[in-house]
């Protein structure tokens, strides 16, 4: 008996009890749907974050005070005080680390900005002109902080579009004076609109010269130094150069850390990959439950059709014919359920971003292929036992079965 | 054609061994038509099942067309059932979901006959048993006599040299029974070896040889004129 023949017999059996077959398939449909959906959400998150991080430039280096070692954890330097990163450190890197295109000192804090009777608490970033290039954030109207502003600790501010809108509405903000934590700042520019990136509203920020920032937050240290290299291949050598320069400036201690965007990217990638696998695995359990449903129905079906098995054997069916008949029936149930589950899963995954914008999804071919082969495997795995049970029946006992 | 030598079939019931067949020896030549008679429980069905390769004897040797059946594996037995022996049951044993035609085609499926040739082989056999106009009917849409004729057509579709019938007329009224018997006698005239289990002396009267069983043993074997 050839495959097509057996498949037809199996299909007839499935169609002869539509309600039962449908309910059995439902288990697999839900399982496959869950796998596709959760994996596409996990993948979506991964693709989204990768895109956002790559958008910042993979050649980015982030230098932060304090030393984190590879053994994990944060080790306070033995002397007891963390030597801070200073504006002069950044200047030294800018002058002497020739592998770097930029070394941007950054101070970070929150401040209350006031204009007339309107006020708003926002993030304040103290930077130098190169910040624009390093972070791909550019000035829209007016001017960004200049080197001269940095050198003279000028009280000038560049507003994110959201801050500008909140305080000035449609009015022109350029040249206006705002109060930033009791100091008077002149607005010299407004950034381009950028939107939210990795949960941070880039438009809800005020940029001021780094030196003014240090004064504002009453500190002589930096939050971090952002550096970048022209080419990704230079990152390793640039790190060595930075270490060389800073260690010498820091009394021969490596009391700072250098993270690369590439390393962060691969860490995130790994974490989200694991997350996706876990989500998929949990969904896989429901597919397994669907498989048990198939096994259950197949066992009932074998019992109900004992007499049919006896008759088929009496007229010449071999054990393998009976085995194939029931196995293909199980695989068809799970396979068809799998296909329906994939169609629904992909459909829903594609629809989600249209309605829930914060939930990006990504349907990958491999997850479809995996869900389908997994559902087929479920059919085989849970079909073999009932099919084998059917095939090994003694013809005369089967014929006598009532 | 058939040679049984000291065939026994015992069932273990608790501590007791019951023999349904206790040392049956028998030779059947090609072209014979034989009635098997005996009281209820004498082992007639058991004998037919052994002959039909549906059941394995617990002892003795069974040779069919010079081949040792007792030594065959499951697949070889399936082949014998498919190609060499047609079996007709008292209770018809048709597949209820399929039409008469599909039921008759079923053995051809397992002989590997491609589907397009099956119908052209099954139709004439159904016509031969007088069911040319009932081919698309399901078993439930047929009378008992018609169902049994479908079962005979199914048994014959592979042109087996041997046809076994276990009380083929047992569930039928006398007229339908008569028709079935006529078909079987007719087949025997065309050369098919036939063995019929029956309680009916009128049926036995039309067979050339009558074997009597009692308590699992052959107690009579005579050829009549
Ligand atoms: N599966 C079984 N387990 C135990 N004993 C069995 C089994 N099948 C048959 N027997 C016994 O074997 C003996 C012969 O049974 P068999 O069915 O061959 O009788 P029979 O001659 O066909 O009777 P009937 O005319 O009523 O059909 C009986 O005593 C029966 O109880
Ligand atoms: Mg009987």
Image: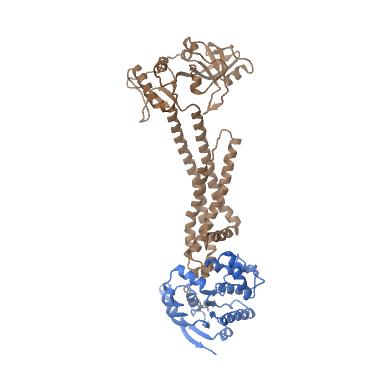
Instruction: List x then y, in percent, for residue A286.
Output: 51, 47
Residue at the right extreme, as displayed:
B133
Chain B on-screen colour: blue
Q: Tell me the brown chain.
A: A
Identify the residue shown where x is 51% and y is 74%. Answer: B84
Identify the residue shown where x is 45% and y is 28%. Answer: A261
Figure coloring:
by chain
Residue B219 or A157: which is nearer the viewer?
A: A157
Q: Is residue B213 positioned above or below A106 on the image? A: below
Image side of residue A93 versus residue A295, left or right: left
Q: Is residue B78 visible?
A: yes
Q: Is residue B144 positioned above or below A182 on the image? A: below
Circle count: 0
Residue A193 or A255: which is nearer the viewer?
A: A193
Instruction: Name the image quarter holding residue B18.
Output: bottom left
Instruction: List x then y, in percent, for residue A13.
Output: 57, 60
Residue at the bottom extreme, as displayed:
B225
Residue B118 or A227: which is nearer the viewer?
A: B118
Residue A73 or A335: which is nearer the viewer?
A: A335
Instruction: List x then y, in percent, for residue A217.
Output: 47, 15
């Amino acid at each position: 008996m050839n495959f097509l023949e057996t498949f037809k017999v199996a299909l007839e059996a499935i169609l002869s009890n539509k309600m039962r077959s449908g309910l059995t398939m439902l288990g697999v449909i839900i399982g496959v749907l869950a796998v596709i959906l959760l994996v596409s959400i996990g993948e979506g998150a991964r693709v989204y974050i990768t895109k956002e991080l790559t958008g910042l430039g993979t050649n980015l280096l982030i230098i932060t005070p304090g030393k984190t070692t590879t053994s994990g954890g944060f080790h306070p330097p033995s002397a007891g005080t963390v030597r801070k990163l200073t504006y002069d450190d950044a200047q030294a890197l800018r002058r002497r680390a020739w592998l770097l295109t930029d070394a941007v000192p950054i101070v970070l804090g929150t401040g209350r900005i006031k204009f007339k009777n309107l006020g708003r608490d926002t993030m304040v970033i103290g930077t130098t002109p190169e910040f624009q290039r390093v972070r791909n954030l550019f000035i829209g109207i007016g001017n960004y902080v200049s080197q001269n502003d940095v050198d003279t600790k000028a009280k000038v501010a560049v507003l994110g579009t959201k801050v500008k809108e909140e305080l000035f509405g449609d009015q022109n903000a350029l040249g206006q004076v705002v109060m930033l934590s009791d100091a008077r700042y002149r607005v010299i520019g407004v950034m381009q609109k950028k939107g939210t990136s990795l949960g941070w509203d880039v438009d809800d920020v005020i940029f001021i010269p780094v030196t003014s920032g240090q004064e504002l937050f009453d500190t002589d240290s930096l939050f971090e130094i952002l550096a970048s290299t022209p080419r990704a291949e230079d990152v390793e050598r640039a790190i060595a150069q930075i270490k060389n320069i800073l260690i010498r400036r820091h009394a021969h201690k490596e009391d700072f850390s250098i993270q690369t965007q590439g390393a962060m990217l691969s860490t995130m990638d790994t974490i989200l990959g694991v997350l996706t696998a876990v989500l998929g695995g949990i969904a896989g359990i429901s597919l397994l439950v669907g498989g048990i449903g198939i096994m259950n129905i197949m066992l009932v079906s074998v019992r109900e059709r004992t007499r049919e098995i006896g008759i088929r054997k009496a007229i010449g069916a071999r054990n393998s014919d009976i085995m194939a008949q029931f196995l293909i029936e199980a695989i068809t149930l799970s396979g068809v359920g799998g296909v329906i589950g994939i169609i629904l899963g992909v459909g829903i995954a594609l629809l989600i971003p249209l309605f829930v914008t914060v939930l990006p999804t990504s349907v990958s071919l491999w997850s479809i292929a995996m869900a389908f082969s997994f559902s087929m495997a479920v059919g085989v795995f849970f079909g073999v036992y009932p099919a084998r049970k059917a095939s090994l029946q003694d013809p005369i006992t089967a014929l006598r079965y009532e | 054609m058939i040679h049984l030598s000291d065939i026994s079939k015992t069932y273990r019931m608790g501590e007791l061994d019951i023999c349904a067949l206790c040392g049956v020896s028998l030779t059947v030549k090609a072209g014979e038509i034989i009635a098997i008679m005996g009281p209820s429980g004498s082992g007639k069905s058991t004998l037919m099942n052994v002959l039909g390769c549906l059941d394995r004897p617990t002892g003795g040797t069974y040779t069919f067309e010079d081949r040792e059946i007792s030594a065959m594996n499951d697949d070889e037995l399936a082949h014998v059932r498919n190609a060499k022996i047609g079996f007709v049951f008292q209770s018809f044993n048709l597949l209820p979901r399929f039409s008469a035609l599909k039921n008759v085609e079923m053995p051809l499926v397992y002989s590997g006959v491609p589907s397009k040739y099956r119908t052209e082989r099954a139709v004439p056999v159904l016509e031969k048993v007088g069911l040319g106009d009932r081919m698309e009917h399901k078993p439930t849409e047929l009378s008992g006599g018609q169902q049994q004729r479908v079962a005979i057509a199914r048994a014959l579709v592979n042109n087996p040299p041997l046809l076994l019938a276990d009380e083929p007329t047992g569930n039928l009224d006398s007229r339908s029974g008569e028709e079935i018997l006529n078909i079987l006698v007719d087949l025997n005239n065309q050369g098919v070896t036939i063995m019929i289990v029956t309680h009916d002396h009128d049926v036995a009267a039309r067979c050339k040889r009558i074997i009597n069983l009692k308590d699992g043993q052959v107690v009579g074997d005579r050829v009549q004129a």
